[in-house]
């Protein structure tokens, strides 16, 4: 297998077994490679270890079960192969910075870590995307022509340099800010490392611009981490969902919109 095929097979295997007993050895065996080779490939391509990736995906799915399916904390813990609610809750807090029971009562957004998928572009060119296409496709098709807020974090790298946990908290706070301004019919999606979109369903430019200004008004508000306060600022631009929906072209437009918002800041 080529490296692209190995990574695709590993990611697919993980996604199909998140609610089962899942070991790194089983994943490597399913791809017919050594564990050391697979772990090295993961760290190079995904920028984290296999175990960390599995945990983030499980906690994302667990959050969806808690909020959308109203599962109990115990049911979620057992489903995702945790031996106790206490161990599950600790793992959940590491991703969400919140206890699962409190999280269920406070938040709607759950897709903090969508599955990573490998996309073949052309010969010898591949890319990784991190967005739950299945959750977005029907919505986007029904709201073609409506406005989309495209946002990312200003200077995430210095926050990650202080602590990866601080960077994760900044990304989560960004999602929460988008959720705070979103109406009931709007959808927040993570589409990259620190890139998010808010599918607004709004068709009037003035209303979309007002929503963007409401989000940007939060710039400078701080996040607390280990006894210190860190101001968080976002860039945000506007685009629209195309009439003829092509995800590759659409997400390329999202990234270009973010770049324009940076240049115009």
Image (tube, grey):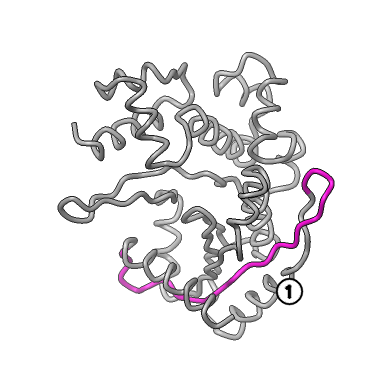
Residue range highlighted in magenta: 225-246
Q: Quadrant of residue 154?
A: bottom right
Image-based side of 255 in relation to 107, left or right: left
Q: How many marks?
A: 1
Q: On screen, 168 above or below 42?
A: below
Q: Residue at x 30, y 71 (%)?
A: 244
- Give the camera-side residue of 141 and 127: 127
Image-based side of 12 in relation to 225, left or right: left
Query: Which quarter shows the N terminus?
Result: top left
Which residue is denoted by mark 1 in the rendering? 217
Q: Residue at x 38, y 51 (%)?
A: 129
Q: Residue at x 70, y 34 (%)?
A: 93
Which residue, as the protein is rendered here, is positioned at the far bottom? 206
Find out whether residue 161 is within the magenta segment: no
Q: Quadrant of residue 216?
A: bottom right
- Give the camera-side residue of 263 and 54: 263
Image-based side of 221 in relation to 18, left or right: right
Q: Position of residue 110 (x, y in %)?
A: 59, 45
Q: On screen, 167 above or below 58?
A: below
Q: Residue at x 50, y 75 (%)?
A: 147
Q: Secondary structure at mark 1?
A: loop
């Amino acid at each position: 297998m080529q490296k692209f095929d190995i990574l695709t097979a590993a990611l697919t295997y993980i996604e199909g077994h998140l609610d089962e007993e899942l070991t790194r050895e089983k994943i490597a065996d399913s791809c017919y490679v050594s564990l050391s080779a697979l772990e090295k490939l993961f760290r190079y391509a995904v920028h984290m270890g296999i175990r960390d990736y599995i945990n983030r995906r499980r906690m994302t799915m667990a959050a969806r079960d808690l909020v959308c399916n109203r599962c109990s904390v115990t049911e979620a813990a057992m489903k995702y192969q945790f031996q106790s609610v206490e161990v599950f809750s600790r793992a959940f807090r590491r991703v969400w910075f919140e206890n699962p029971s409190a999280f269920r009562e406070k938040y709607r957004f759950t897709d903090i870590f969508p599955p990573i998928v490998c996309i073949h572009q052309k010969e010898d060119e591949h890319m990784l995307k991190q967005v739950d296409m299945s959750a977005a496709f029907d919505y986007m098709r029904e709201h073609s022509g409506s406005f989309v807020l495209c946002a990312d974090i200003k200077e995430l790298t210095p926050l990650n340099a202080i602590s990866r946990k601080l960077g994760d908290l900044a990304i989560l706070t960004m999602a929460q800010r988008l959720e705070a301004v979103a109406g009931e019919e709007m959808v927040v999606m993570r589409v990259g490392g620190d890139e998010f979109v808010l599918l607004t369903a709004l068709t009037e430019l003035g209303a979309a611009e007002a929503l963007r200004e409401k989000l940007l008004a939060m710039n400078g508000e701080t996040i607390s981490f280990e006894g210190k306060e860190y101001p968080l600022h976002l860039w945000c631009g506007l685009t629209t969902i195309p009439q003829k929906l092509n995800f590759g072209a659409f997400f390329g437009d999202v990234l270009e919109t973010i770049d324009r918002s940076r240049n115009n800041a």
